[in-house]
Amino acid sequence: MRHTTFRQLEIFEAIARTGSFTRAADELHLTQPTVSMQMKKLAEYVGVPLIEQIGKKVHLTDAGRALAQASREVFGIMDRFAMVVAECQGLKKGRLRLTAITTASYVAPRLLGDFAQIYPDIEVALTVTNRERVLKNLGENISDLYILGQPPEEIDVVAQPFMENPLYVIAAPDHPLAGESRIPLTRLAKEPWLLREHGSGTRMAIERLFAKHGLEIQPRMELGSSEAIKQAILAGFGISALSHHALALNPPEQFAILDAEGFPIRRQWYAVYPAGREPSIVARAFLDFLLSHGKTYDAPSADLATKA
Ligand code: PGA
């Protein structure tokens, strides 16, 4: 192991994360032969195989997985060291790796944009993915901070709420229930529902509300994003409940917000990191930014507010 270089660990970590030699080479601006040669040397230094390639697929061996985890820890330590140095020089410089759950893509880029105005030298990488993947990244320590609509129960984390995230029932403007008051949940349960895929935090919150009242809703259609749900609502397939952030760019008259019992479901956006892991200086700066600025972003539009 003594001859292993940081560069080799960096290449190996990129392969482990992306599952591909080609993507790792692209990400690090290297040629594929360089990547292959460095991985061959690394396996020689370690003395056991780290990667198995079956067809085009890259699989990590047990030793490979352990080395991927060790590499992330080493880079985490070095990133923190680099930021301590930057801090000593009076600079807030460095890298922020953020993983945001699908629906948070409506808020995260705007927050990052404003953060970047204050700290233009901080390099930001944002991954947007579903809840299952967010939890996997959290377990593997891939990012510095995670944005979720509901903190995970299965992993020990520090979770800080920073912004309101209410879910409203949305229908097409000509829907028969539009304009009715206090629509009972029993009535709503009879509607055809458009739901996100299993594992979506939004879907979990909706199903939980109905289940609390002994009701179950039948999905008429499952769709993988809020955008697809909005299109299906307009096409007359049914109703759904969405984060009010998902409607931020739509004109208010495009959708009807139903005045339904139990809605809006009051939720929050949370910034999360693993318990026992001190966030880097950059991650801490972003967390402070979220906690001090988040509230200023969350005022629902006038139309939504009147229905709340
Ligand atoms: P989702 O999660 O995008 O997976 O629905 C968002 C949330 O939990 O609110």
Image (spheres, rainbow, N blue to C red):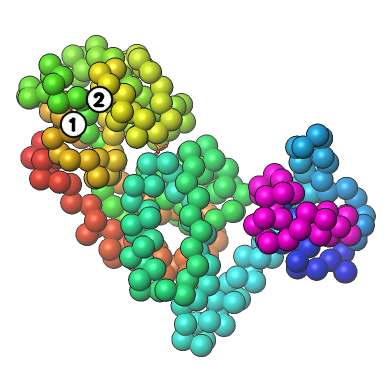
The residue at 69%/65% (across/down) is: 74
Q: Is residue 82 visible?
A: yes
- Work out whether residue 156 or residue 139 is closer to the camera in this orientation and state it: 139
Give the residue pinned by disc 1. Answer: 255
> Which quadrant of the structure image shows residue 258?
top left
Q: Secondary structure at mark 2?
A: helix
- Asked whether, in this view, residue 96 is left or right of residue 206, the answer is right
Q: Main secondary structure of the magenta part?
A: helix
Determine crowd level at label 1: few under 14, some 14-19, many 20+ residues with C-alpha closer than 10 A: many
**Looking at this view, is 209 or 89 the one in front?**
89
Which label's residue is closer to the chain start, 2 or 1?
2
Could you tell me the amino acid type at mark 2?
Answer: Leu
- Number of marks: 2
Q: CA distance from mark 2 to mark 1?
A: 8 Å
Residue in view at x 40 percent, y 74 percent: 119
The amino acid on which the numbered mark 1 sits, given as a three-letter code, is Phe
Q: Quadrant of the N terminus?
A: bottom right
Query: Where does residue 257 sit, x and y in percent of width and height?
Result: 16, 31
